[in-house]
Every structure is written in structure tokens, then in C-alpha cells.
């Protein structure tokens, strides 16, 4: 998959970056060729996001130079980057929830009619055209606050495509997309490459890097390890170069659980506005999976259970006792925990420190005479930093400066601090590297070893298959069936997720 031309469009030369005297990039040099897709991989904290933000003007390098089209350039801000034809699809969404889809797509690039007034019709029509390129059926007048995470991702991609960029940076663009949506996106990327656009593709999904990229640059601990032609390197070697050692099996051995020891039963829980009701059960120490295509209703079901959204009816039993949950706080009081798929929007507080984030829900434990015991907060956070292998230059740094994997670990620590008995993980490894994934999988198993029961909602088929002892599959807001044992494979899950159930019914 070699590109037609080998001339360099953008060069990063000996770039280093320091935060508070801590070096996070060390003399990195990479060339981005015209009309190529260059993969950028590395563990969380390797420096990928920092490098991306330097190219797009969000950060300034401590030392080193940037060369664009043969000329040395300064990119002091995002506006300058945009004027140079550099556009970015960020991993964490940069959308305004109170604005409509088309308003977000055109924010800062509004279209005007012949009299200089904003033309909503022109913007709506162009927004529909951009979304149609991605084969996404989205109402351009819908509020962004009402969209799923996958739909928000498509809005971000549409924003970037609108700018007709010469350099397109894509930071984990596929983490919430279905296989079909990924294939559509890859076709768009290939067409852009044919048009001469250069794409920097940041991803933890090595199979996708192998599939779509021409070359791949590998970072480790802020240093460039190598740049490889994708056709000449396999996924195992990519992983080895990323982590500096041979990579072993990601998933721990599956757990056996006692199906008579039920800790949670949900009977006929119905979401507001839907006619369908769902029932399921969870055993003590079990890792229970919920699979389905994006939009199947998995997240909505558990947000209703946690009363993060209204539910019309249904009964909930915890350890055999019927309970009524009226609010998220009551759910926490019943020892339920929910780790949202939307880490930035509904999870961490990016301007808070590690300790402030970890103790947020259980803050009452640290308050005495209306004052927060800061020392106790910091001591507890230090325990979690060690236990979760959270890499932090300083515990006093705001979480926005941390990598996605380390942010996720802090988010997990917050819920563990509430001492839950049932923990719901919604897309627990979205946007984190292969080694951090392994750590989180081992952590989930450790929780189960200590009697905590876990539910994993995931769009990653390998994650569901590798982790879960039983799997409920949803489609169009309703549970279509439950799989266990050897039935938990990609074919069975897709049969249920798409409505083809004949083979599974025969086997049952």
C-alpha cells in the first residue's frame, strides 16, 4: 500500500516538550508525506496526544522545529493551524451540547448568504451532504446533547472534513464506531488520500493500523522507536515495539461462577418512551457482557437502572431483596457503580487533580466540621496511584494533562472508592492502549476475585468474547438472547445483534 509520491509535506524535527520540567517528548523527528496515511501508535503516556497537539497549535514545543511544505513554520494556536490546512478529529469531543448538529459542524466556519447574513439553509444542506459522505442518518437539527457517543464522533469527523484540510489528524476516530461505520470511514480516508490529503491516524487498534496505513510511527516513553512500512511489520511486532517487550495474552482465564448465587435481577425494566421491557440477572463474582451494535440500547438500559435517565416500569432485586431506586445517589447507596462510556462528558472532571477526582463521589468520608481533609484525600489517592499504576508527573496536575488510559484508571479508582458490590463498565477501554487494556482486564478479574460482580458493555467483540462468562445481546432497545460457553463467539453475537437467530435457537 505504498503512496505514489514520497515528497514530504510536513516534518517534525527534533521536537521536545516539557511540562513542569518533566519531559514528555524527547527529540522526536517524523516526516509526513503527501497523500499518505501515517499511523501513530504507542502506549498511553507515550507522547502521541502531545505530538498531535503541537502539530495542531494547541501546545508549543519546548525545542525543535516544524517544517510545512518546505518552510519552517510556527503554529502558535489552532486558528493558525486551520489556516495552514491542518484539521483535527479529537478523541475527546469538542462539541457544544446546547447547539444543533449543523451549528456544531459550522461553528467558527459559518456560511453566509448574499447579504452577509448567516444562512441556516445553506449550512443545513451542506451538513447533510457531509454526513451523507459518512452514510450517517442524523437529523442536522438534533441537539448534540441528545446524540450517542458514536453519533457525536461522526459530527466531529464531519467538522474536520468540511475544512478541506491538507493534513487531517485523526485521534482514535473508530473507538465507538461499528464495523460498518469503520469501513465507511476508511473508504472516505482512502478517497482523501487519492486526493493528496495527508492523514495522521492515531489508534490503539493495531489491526486497523495494519489495514489502513501506509507507514506507522511508534512512540515509547516520549521517544520515537521507529517508523515502519506497514506491509513489512505485523501486529505482534508493533505491540512489542510499543511496550518494549514480548506481548503476552491480553485476557486472563475466564471465571466460573455459581449461577444459583444471584446478586442482581432486573425484571421488565422499560425505558421512558419505549414499548419494550428487558429482564436479566447477574451472579456473584461474574463478568457479564452486554453486546450489540451502536444504538442497540445497552447504555440507555443501564442509565435507566442507575436512574441517570427515567424508566417507566420494572422491578429490581439486589441479593434477593426488592429495591426501589429513585436517583443515582440511591443507586450508589445500594452499592451499584456505573463507569460511563463518555469519560469526558459524564466521568472525570478534567480541571480537578487526581485526589479530587478519586474522592468526588465518596467526599463525605473526607469532610469534618465542614472542611475537607486534604491530607487524607492525598494519602488515599497515592494508594490508588500505586495500585492502578497511574503514571503522573505530579498528583497536583489537572487531569486534562493526563493520557486517556491514566484518566480512565483515575475514573475507575473513584468508583472503587465507593466500595461497590456491583460495578457496570460501559466501554471500559475506549481509546486506551493495549497494555493499559490488559491492566484493566486484570483489574476487573481482581474485583471479581474479591466478590464484586461486574457488567461489561462493549462494542469491541474481542473484549466481550475474551472477558465474559455470559453475554446478553441487544437490538433496537431489547435483549434478543443470552449466550454462554462456546456460544460466545463473533458469529453468534452478530446473529442476535442483526436479528438472525435461527442457528442459536436450534442449538438451544
Image (tube, rainbow, N blue to C red):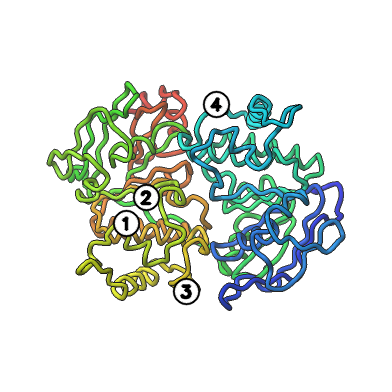
Residue at point 28%, 42% (across, down) = 306
Residue at point 67%, 31% (across, down) = 118
Q: Is residue 493 left or right of residue 372?
A: right
Q: Nearer the viewer, mark 1 or mark 4?
A: 4
Q: CA distance from mark 2 to mark 4?
A: 28 Å
Residue 356: horizontal and vertical position, in percent? 37, 64
The residue wearing badge 3 is: 394
Does the residue at mark 2 contact the one at mark 1 (Cβ under 8 Å)? Answer: yes
Chain-order first, disc 2 or disc 4: 4
Q: Residues within 10 Å of mark 2 (few under 14, many from 20)?
A: many
Q: Residues within 10 Å of mark 3 (few under 14, many from 20)?
A: few
User: In this orientation, which residue lies closer to the viewer: 263 or 31?
Assistant: 31
Mark 1 falls on what kind of element? helix
Residue at point 12%, 41% (across, down) = 321
Q: Nearer the viewer, mark 2 or mark 4?
A: 4
Residue 205: horizontal and vertical position, in percent? 57, 50
Chain-order first, disc 1 or disc 4: 4
Q: Residues within 10 Å of mark 1 (few under 14, many from 20)?
A: many
The residue wearing badge 2 is: 339
Mark 4 falls on what kind of element? loop
Amino acid at each position: 500500500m505504498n503512496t505514489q509520491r514520497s515528497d514530504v509535506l510536513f516534518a517534525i524535527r527534533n521536537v521536545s516538550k516539557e511540562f513542569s520540567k518533566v519531559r514528555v517528548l524527547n527529540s522526536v523527528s517524523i516526516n509526513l508525506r503527501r497523500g499518505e496515511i501515517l499511523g501513530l501508535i504507542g502506549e498511553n503516556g507515550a507522547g502521541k496526544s502531545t505530538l498531535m497537539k503541537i502539530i495542531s497549535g494547541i501546545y508549543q514545543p519546548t525545542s525543535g522545529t516544524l517544517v510545512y511544505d518546505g518552510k519552517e513554520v510556527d503554529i502558535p494556536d489552532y486558528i493558525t493551524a486551520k489556516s495552514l490546512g491542518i484539521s483535527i478529529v479529537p478523541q475527546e469531543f469538542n462539541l457544544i451540547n446546547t447547539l444543533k448538529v449543523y451549528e456544531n459542524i459550522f461553528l467558527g466556519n459559518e456560511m453566509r448568504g448574499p447579504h452577509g447574513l448567516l444562512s441556516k439553509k445553506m449550512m443545513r444542506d451542506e451538513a447533510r451532504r457531509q454526513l451523507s459522505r459518512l452514510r450517517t442518518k442524523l437529523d442536522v437539527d438534533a441537539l448534540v446533547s441528545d446524540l450517542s457517543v458514536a453519533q457525536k464522533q461522526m459530527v466531529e469527523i464531519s467538522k474536520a472534513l468540511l475544512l478541506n484540510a491538507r493534513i487531517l489528524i485523526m485521534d482514535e476516530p473508530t473507538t465507538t464506531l461499528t464495523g460498518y461505520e469503520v469501513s465507511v470511514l476508511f473508504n472516505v480516508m482512502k478517497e482523501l488520500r487519492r486526493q493528496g490529503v495527508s492523514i495522521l491516524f492515531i489508534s490503539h487498534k493495531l489491526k486497523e493500523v495494519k489495514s489502513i496505513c501506509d507507514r506507522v510511527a511508534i512512540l515509547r516513553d516520549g521517544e520515537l522507536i521507529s517508523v515502519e512500512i506497514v506491509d513489512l511489520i505485523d501486529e505482534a511486532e508493533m505491540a512489542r515495539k510499543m511496550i518494549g517487550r514480548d506481548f503476552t495474552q491480553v485476557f486472563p482465564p475466564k471465571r466460573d461462577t455459581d449461577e444459583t448465587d444471584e446478586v442482581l435481577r432486573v425484571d421488565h425494566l422499560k425505558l421512558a418512551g419505549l414499548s419494550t421491557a428487558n429482564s436479566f440477572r447477574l451472579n456473584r463474582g461474574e463478568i457479564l457482557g452486554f453486546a450489540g451494535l451502536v444504538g442497540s440500547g445497552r447504555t440507555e438500559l443501564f442509565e435507566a437502572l442507575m436512574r441517570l435517565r427515567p424508566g417507566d416500569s420494572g422491578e429490581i432485586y439486589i441479593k434477593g431483596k426488592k429495591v426501589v431506586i429513585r436517583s443515582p445517589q440511591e443507586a450508589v447507596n445500594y452499592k451499584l457503580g456505573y463507569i460511563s462510556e463518555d469519560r469526558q462528558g459524564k466521568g472525570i472532571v478534567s480541571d480537578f487533580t487526581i485526589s479530587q477526582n478519586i474522592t468526588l463521589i465518596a467526599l463525605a468520608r473526607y469532610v469534618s466540621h465542614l472542611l475537607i481533609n486534604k491530607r487524607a484525600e492525598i494519602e488515599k489517592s497515592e494508594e490508588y496511584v500505586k495500585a492502578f499504576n497511574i503514571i503522573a508527573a505530579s498528583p497536583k496536575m489537572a487531569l486534562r494533562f493526563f493520557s486517556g488510559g491514566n484518566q480512565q484508571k483515575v475514573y475507575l479508582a473513584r468508583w472503587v472508592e465507593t466500595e461497590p458490590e456491583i460495578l457496570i463498565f460501559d466501554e471500559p477501554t475506549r481509546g486506551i492502549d493495549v497494555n493499559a487494556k490488559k491492566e484493566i482486564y486484570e483489574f476487573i478479574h481482581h474485583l471479581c476475585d474479591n466478590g464484586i460482580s461486574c457488567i461489561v458493555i462493549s462494542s469491541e467483540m474481542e473484549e466481550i468474547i475474551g472477558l465474559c462468562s455470559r453475554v446478553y445481546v441487544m437490538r433496537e432497545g431489547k435483549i434478543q438472547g443470552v449466550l454462554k460457553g462456546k456460544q460466545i463467539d463473533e458469529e453468534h453475537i452478530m446473529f442476535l445483534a442483526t436479528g438472525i437467530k435461527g442457528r442459536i435457537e436450534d442449538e438451544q
